[in-house]
Amino acid sequence: MFSLLLGIIYLAFISLGLPDALLGSAWPSMYLEFGVPVSYMGILSVIISLGTVVSSLQTDRLARRLGTGRVTALSVALTAAALFGFSVTHSFWLLCLWAVPYGLGAGCVDAALNNFVALHYESRHMSWLHCMWGLGATVGPYFMSLALTRGAGWSGGYRYISLLQLGLTAVLMGSLPLWKRCGRAEEPGKTPQLESQALSLREIFRISGTREVFLCFFCYCALEQSAGQWASSYLTLCRGVAPETAARFASLFYIGITVGRAFCGFLSIRMRDDALIRLGQTVLGIGVLSMALPGPQLLALAGFLLVGLGCAPIYPCIIHSTPARFGVERSQAIIGVQMACAYVGNCVMPPLFGVLADLFSAALLPFYLLLILLLMVWMHRELIRKTKKRKR
């Protein structure tokens, strides 16, 4: 029963990643057709991100009222509808309207699925599931490329993905009885989620350790996105790396995260979540220092790859350890806020570095990443200290 549902959740995580890179791959064609500046992609990205923040914060209430299975199915259906809306829209402002359900669906399904897996499955599955998300994020642009080369245009790419999401919605709706049985059953070594009222934001922030875990999550996502978006520019402008080589290593950065999570799934059999988080932070630190040290280009390129590998275990391990730290009855509420912090970090910190690069220099990137990393390490140490103290 748990194995069958796990297969469905793997499909859901692949589906979750499919739309994430679509906008970036389609925008060079889209902005010309709509007759808007290229910078308008930022407007759509902000609307989608705000929607994910809002829905992540509401996931606890929705999951308690509807159950994780229904929330997941309805969220995927909402995303499918938004993607289809993108495919038939010929106005930028209508795109902005469709971006609202796009973000609302993505945030809710992300928080709900992560909590369900953290409650009912082992740490290795969390790593492998996020590896599947990376696979989906890699395949999505391929579908867009296929649509563009076959003359279907960017709208065809969105339509292909919306149909895949619609098919997954049907699978999820058919599996609802399985979600209910798995939610009630107790897997060996796990505790079923308790029934209680949804927590308010004020109540969540009063729980010892939540502020630290939220800042830790914010820092991780800020570091990952800042490195992913700005490292190519840093390598080209500050280390003299050819633009095509820098672009190739930018793709390897995300491949490194995906492959790293596959390996971390095996490491988690022997290592606990906190140990894997510390290992990732250590590799991240070595990578950032390699980028900062003067020397041959190869040193900076190797550092960039190490940053990607170091990122691999942190996100899934923080999520998976949440029920053990804070209790299963609180985990959905806390994971929802964690997701919201992730999207805030994604939105705020990369543009902030862009401002710093304009005012000073792009050469500040390794030091910017290092400051974020040090704050994350500090918050993780404080998180362990406070949660251990509460358990005594």
Image: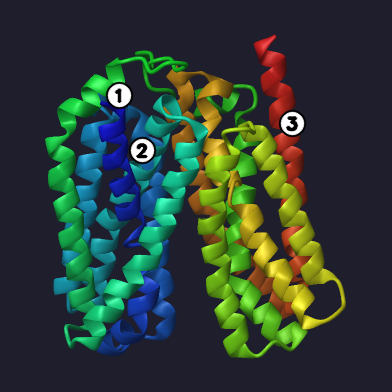
Mark 1 vs mark 2, foreground winner is 2
For marks 1 and 2, give the CA distance: 13 Å
Residue under label 3:
382
- Which element type, helix, strand or loop, lies under badge 1? helix
* Residue shown at 17% from the left, 57% from the top: 81
User: Is residue 147 or residue 22 the one in the foreground?
Assistant: 147
Relative to 178, residue 252 above or below: below
* Residue shown at 57% from the left, 38% from the top: 317
Tag shown at residue 127: none
* Residue shown at 47% from the left, 30% from the top: 122
Q: Residue reaching furthest top?
A: 392
Q: Label 2 neighbourhood size at 10 Å, few (<14), some (14-19), many (20+)? A: some
Mark 1–mark 2 CB contact (< 8 Å): no
For marks 3 and 2, give the CA distance: 27 Å
Relative to 188, residue 76 above or below: below
Quarter in which the N terminus is drawn: top left
* Residue shown at 57% from the left, 88% from the top: 244
Examine the rendering and report whether any part of residue 350 can be seen.
no
Residue under label 1:
64
Q: Position of residue 331 (x, y in %)?
A: 47, 26
Tag shown at residue 113: 2
Relative to 315, residue 71 above or below: above
Q: Label 3 neighbourhood size at 10 Å, few (<14), some (14-19), many (20+)? A: some
Q: Amino acid at mark 3?
A: Glu
Q: Amino acid at mark 1?
A: Arg
Q: Which of pointers 3 and 1 lies earlier in the amino acid sequence?
A: 1
Q: Label 1 neighbourhood size at 10 Å, few (<14), some (14-19), many (20+)? A: some
Q: Amino acid at mark 2?
A: Leu
